[in-house]
Image (cartoon, rainbow, N blue to C red):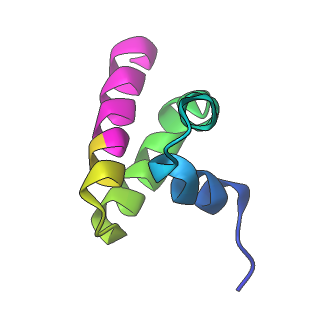
């Protein structure tokens, strides 16, 4: 199965490097409202509480800024 850019970004959400994390979050945030559904699906399939927490924060930021 070919990994998409979105999948790669989700996989990097737990990266300990703050520079990488900031870049990943900016990329996902820039998806805007079209990315919310994908982020919700990624949250549901993740077993990593850190990744889930970061996804929740991103969804919240997107909803505040794009709705």
Which residue is drawn at the image coordinates 42% and 25% (left, top)? Answer: 62
Q: Residue furthest top?
A: 65
In the displayed structure, 62 sits above or below 50; it is above
Image quadrant containing the N terminus: bottom right
In the displayed structure, 2 sits above or below 20; it is below
Which residue is drawn at the image coordinates 53% and 54% (left, top)? Answer: 10
Residue 13 locus on image (x, y percent)? 49, 48
In the displayed structure, 21 sits above or below 47; it is above
Predominant SS of the magenta segment: helix
Which residue is drawn at the image coordinates 42% and 13% (left, top)? Answer: 65
Quadrant in which residue 8 is drawn: bottom right
**Residue 51 drawn in magenta:** no
Quadrant in which residue 63 is drawn: top left
The part of the chain drawn in magenta is: 54-67
User: What is the number of callouts on the image?
Assistant: 0
Q: Residue furthest bottom?
A: 1
Q: Nearer the viewer, residue 50 or 10?
A: 50
Q: Nearer the viewer, residue 48 or 46?
A: 48
**Residue 64 drawn in magenta:** yes
Quadrant in which residue 67 is drawn: top left
In the displayed structure, 52 sits above or below 31; it is below
Q: Residue furthest front?
A: 17
Residue 30 locus on image (x, y percent)? 61, 27
Left of 21 or right of it: where is 64? left
């Amino acid at each position: 199965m070919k990994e998409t850019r979105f999948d790669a970004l989700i996989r990097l959400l737990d990266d300990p490097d703050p520079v990488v994390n900031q870049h990943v979050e900016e990329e996902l945030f820039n998806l805007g409202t079209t990315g919310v559904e994908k982020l919700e699906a990624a949250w549901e399939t993740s077993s990593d509480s850190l990744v889930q927490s970061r996804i929740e924060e991103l969804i919240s930021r997107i909803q505040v800024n794009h709705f």
